Image (spheres, rainbow, N blue to C red):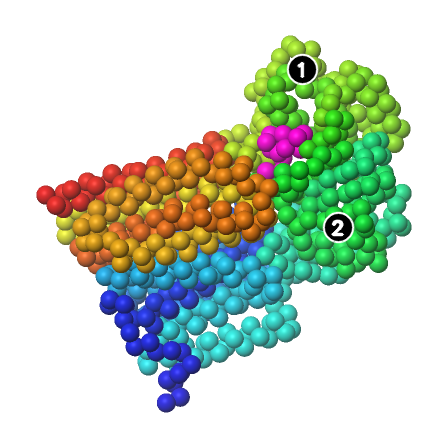
Amino acid sequence: MGLEMRWIPDFGVSLGDLPAQRLLGAAVLSASALLLEIALTRLFSLIFFPYYVFLIISVAILGIGIGAAVATLWPAFAQRIGFALGSIFAALFTALLLLFAASGSAVDMQLLLFFLLALPYLCFGLVISTLFSAHIAASRILYMGDLLGAGCGALLAIPLLNGFGAINTILIAALGFTVAGLYFSTRRDRLVAVVCAATAGIALGVNVASRALDMDPSKLAAEKPIVAALSDGGRVLRTSWDAFARTDLVDRGAGRPLQIYVDGGAASVMPTEAARRELLGDIGFFPFATEQPERVFVIGPGAGLDVWFALQSGAQQVIAVEVNGASLELAREWRGYSGPLYDRAEVKVIVDDGRSALRRSGQKFDLIYLSQVVTLAAERGGYALSENTIYTEEAFSDYLNHLDERGQIALKLYDEVTLTRAVSTALSAFRRRGLTDQRALDHLMAFIDGKSSPSAPLLLIGASPFSEDDSLALGAIAREVGFRPLLLPHVLIQPPLDSVASGAKLFDAIIQSSDVDISPATDERPYFFQFEKGIPASLFPLVALAVAVTAVLVLVIGFQLQRGRGSIQRGYPLVFALLGIGFIALEIYVIQRTRLFLGHPTIAVTLVLVTFLVGGGFGSGLSQLVLTRGHERRPQMLTAAVLMLAIVWSVIWSPLNTMFLAADATVRGLITVLSLAPLAMCMGVPYPLALKLAGIDDRRQVALAWCVNGLMTVVGSVAAVALSLTAGFSAVLYFGAGAYLVATLILAVIHNRGES
């Protein structure tokens, strides 16, 4: 009849006790959930600052655990909701969340936002845990569908975000939930599933055509610079959404130059001849005017001001590397306003990570220039938890390696505390080259523009030491144009640097006595804007969340295990907790280690994520065919294999990085995937195998496992961030590997008791 939906295939086959229709439903459900998560990071990066985005995504993962907890404590309720209605409710809650976020109320009603955010994932956790409970024997095939679906969601995220933007991609995820509901539906609930899927499709089509639902940038978080620009008479001329950011071109009015804002911040000026006098008075022009470099490498040119500076000084070659391709496209689109800066013969433009592109360039330059690459000083605090390998000790070493003998690095910074940390990092980079702090100071000059608001400092780092004549000449020019010298070797060295210049103390002593953290940023701890010592206050809500989650989890486990049948089953919840912690910690570690090698951060994160998900899915599916019953009874061998492969990968990655650094992007991506494939495939096996073994003994353990695994993934991600801030990313590796080690020991004990 009309409700048969012949366009939805009825496979009529089963994989063990698992109908293929449900396997596809699980895959579509997982794809939609991960696509929604990625799209939400884009939406909330516009509304909030990065540490808030991390909190919000943690709440989403928390929702999965809560949904599984509901299935654990009230299995009859979960079965009454059913797979189809649970998926449809996920779509409805996604739409409700999007309407609330787009209304502009999210900033003022954050608790309600967190609640709404958890609801789609609560439905996902409810459905997926109940589905696994119903098909225990096919756990590994079902887990394969879950991971492969999630991998497809991650793979589709970039083209969908580039083509449709964050809001429409969220609507596509909602449509995906309803399609999963169609696959899960029976005759009883099929009409509801059809109506909901049709409604979701129509809503998506209408919004793509009309942009009826969109974000108003004037209603973002009050700290974002675009809000001030729009409230001061500015207007948005053009908007571009993609997988990296939302990019807005804003006319601030009053004859001021146009600016491009990335996610409401990171404003960059679009130069114009009408504002020539004002722009040439910027402290950022100082190194171009004084040195007149012929070969320039610019990191983060944005709307083109830095390239304009280089051309004004007569540069013959300008390589500009911008991670946000939309900024370049907007600048080209408005070439009638600023001129064809990016189309000049002297200018080569690359869309990539600046440091990564420099390492592969094989060239040396007269000037390497970075002008407030991340953001404005006024919003610096919002990016404290944002990793950035542009301003690390190893990055400064890379810059020095690509300078001519008299070349310079110029950094326009944000305020005096960022200047101090840049000095600290530069001194550490020179120590790597065998220089003492006393000698390294001869390579540094610093100035500040008191006329700008806030006052913007400039740090010059010379490949060769500055002479006294250099200091006198540049100091005189700076004073003449209104800049105040802060550091001039042999001429002006203020306390406390004077004691370092005299050799009386090392800069480490200044670091130790400082009230804030001004230690060198490194690739191990790449948080240049994190000045609080220890765990920052902005992370406290996440720590509190992790503690609360752990406490609730202990209560849930205790309640459920009181109904268990024996002591063997009591060890499984801890195993599932450790697997959740270990998986997320290793994933975070690998993403950080590969990001610079792969280049563009969006591509790097997506490639690693897809490798882990798809590799884990294939590993889980293959294990169903390969592992014998005897092997199944020794799951500790699989967790031990993950531990070994993680250590092996961490050892071989450095030589692989060095060997293939200059290779084509496709080759680098292939090397990354091939090196990670054995680890990813192995990581996909222990969890579903443990699910099967636990479920055979007690079916209620399956939903409990999803609850524990989801909630402890939140705890693991928070712990990984805290460790990376305080001890570095190597500690995150040890943390993840340690979780697999303890899981191995517990599984060995469980199954030794089971066999005795």
Given residues 226 and 501, the one toward you in this image is 501
Residue 157 lies, in percent from the top left, at 53, 60
The secondary structure making up most of the magenta span is: helix
Q: Which residues are magenta?
A: 389-401
Evaluate whether residue 107 shows in this view: no
Q: Tag 2: residue type?
A: Ala
- Residue at x 50%, y 59% (from the top left corner): 155
Residue position for label 2: 303
Camera-nearest residue between 10 and 80: 10
Residue 507 magenta-highlighted: no
Name which residue lies at 47% across and 38% down. 653
SS of the residue at dot 2? loop
Q: Is residue 51 positioned above or below 405 on the image?
A: below
Where residue 496 appears, x then y in whole percent? 67, 17
Res. 412 image quadrant: top right
Q: Which amino acid does the dot numbered 1 rest on?
A: Gln
How many numbered circles are shown?
2
Foreground of the two, 410 or 130: 410
393 inside magenta stretch? yes
Q: Secondary structure at mark 1?
A: helix
Place of residue 390 in the rendered image (x, y in percent of width and height, measured from the top left): 63, 38
Q: CA distance from mark 1 to mark 2?
A: 39 Å
Q: What's the residue at 32%, 70% (across, down)?
A: 20
Q: Is residue 620 visible?
A: yes
Q: Quadrant of residue 167?
A: bottom right
Q: Name the residue located 63 percent from the left edge and 38 percent from the top edge.
A: 359
Relative to 124, is 754 on the left or the right? left
| Tag 1 residue | 438
